[in-house]
Amino acid sequence: MPEDTSPARAVHELIRDELALDGNSSQNLATFCTTWAEPEVHELMDLCLDKNMIDKDEYPQTAEIESRCVRIIGDLWNAPTAATPSSTTGPTAADPSGTGSPTGCSTTGSSEAGMLGGLALKWRWRKRREAAGLPTDRPNLVCGPVQVCWEKFARYFDVELRQVPLEPDATGLRPHQLRDHVDENTIGVVAILGVTYTCDYEPVAEIAAELDAIERDTGLDVPIHVDAASGGFIAPFLHPEVAWDFRLPRVASINASGHKYGMAPLGVGWVVWRAAELLPEELVFRVSYLGGDMPTFALNFSRPGGEVVAQYYTFLRLGREGYRKVYEAASRTARSLAEQIGDTDGFRLLYDGQGALPAVSWTLSDPRRSPFTLYDLTERLRLRGWQVPAYPLPADRQETVVQRVLIRHGIGFDKIALLGQDIRAAVAELSEGPCAAAPRPGFHH
Ligand SMILES: *Cc1c(COP(=O)(O)O)cnc(C)c1O
């Protein structure tokens, strides 16, 4: 830190100049996160710079907007409403009315949201076990190929992560695999709506049906938490017929990233429970030192309110129609890229952009015979500024390297057509072998 102060403009320019060294986010096809926002979002974010989400007494209207977002999202995910009370426990801190209507909150992202969902599962499992006089020292969580946040959850909160190996040609957890992994110490099953590696939805309804069958056969009643980090804001608009959400009684809670396909700026996620009674009372803290008496459930304390306000803006601004149109366009763009990839010699599509996320993933059809690896292609595309990641599939299929492109708001048809051209040019060059790529005309003034 320098001894003296400096002119604001000069420091601003200095930092701005340095930030230019970062990648260009509009060519970052690796991220699920929002990289484009309307000017109105920038203005609202600015307006909310001083609003602390935790300070619900000082900023009651921001808190009210958060509650509205939770209700909007609960509705998108078909949560049962208070009109059909299911609570047997009466009023609680999280559910003052005792109506059993959905409850939830904003978080910094799906990682925190997933951890809150996981904690609620762990607490409910432990209570059930304690009530039955059974040991509570070996909880486990069953899942397929999950995002790293679930590995973190398991380690941070002392739960065994039972990752079910990916079967050959599968893009996620398959229901018939569950029976071998679920037992009396299973706090829940995490199903992924939009698998990070492959972009496909796991079949939540079939997973629920298999758990129903397991309950009939063994008496084990295992709840589902759906990690809908990316799919939670796609499926309601593009695949309303897919039952993955609270329409399935076994789904206890769901998380999603507002800053992914929710189209809010970076820094917001959501978690919603089917009914307030599913959120154990002990996890809800009541703080009074900010002036009011507000129940909170979060890992963070202070947190900006702007992202939540911007999420609310996006809901009102786009409406269901807007989300549907944006993602129908994204889906068409993804399918056009899938067609180009499918037509290119040497590639095999893993996910073609239909039926789940607006995205494409592929592998080399014969890696051993290919004159280049997907890592080479990633590097080659980087010369043109594209970030198209290559990575191995998770455990048991790690020998398969895949490449993935995510289409979101701001990644249009024309841009993807340009990417297609660059992929074809890169493949042609790489196929000529390493020497062909070397001598190039020099630089001429
Ligand atoms: C991105 C992602 C997460 C983590 O979400 P953040 O909002 O980045 O914390 C968790 N699960 C899945 C399936 C994801 O795609």
Image (cartoon, rainbow, N blue to C red):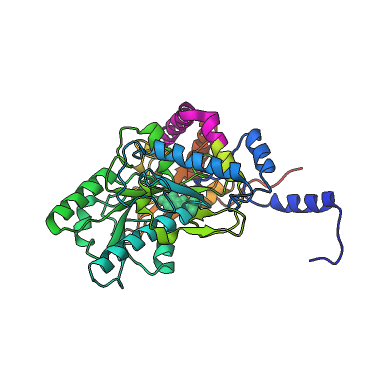
Residue at (62% x, 44% y) in the render = 306
Quick check: can you spot residue 169? yes
Image coords of residue 386 (percent x, y): 56, 45
* Quarter of the image where the C terminus is located: top right
Image coords of residue 141 (percent x, y): 32, 61
The span picked out in magenta is 313-340
For residue 179, what is the image quadrant?
Answer: bottom left
Q: Is residue 388 left or right of residue 392?
A: right
Residue at (40% x, 42% y) in the render = 231
Magenta span contains residue 85: no
Quick check: can you spot residue 423? no
Q: Main secondary structure of the magenta part?
A: helix
* Quarter of the image where the N terminus is located: bottom right
**Nearest to the observer: residue 176 or residue 366:** 176
Q: Is residue 126 left or right of residue 429?
A: left
Image coords of residue 427 (percent x, y): 47, 44
Q: Is residue 7 left or right of residue 391?
A: right
Q: Is residue 179 left or right of residue 172?
A: left
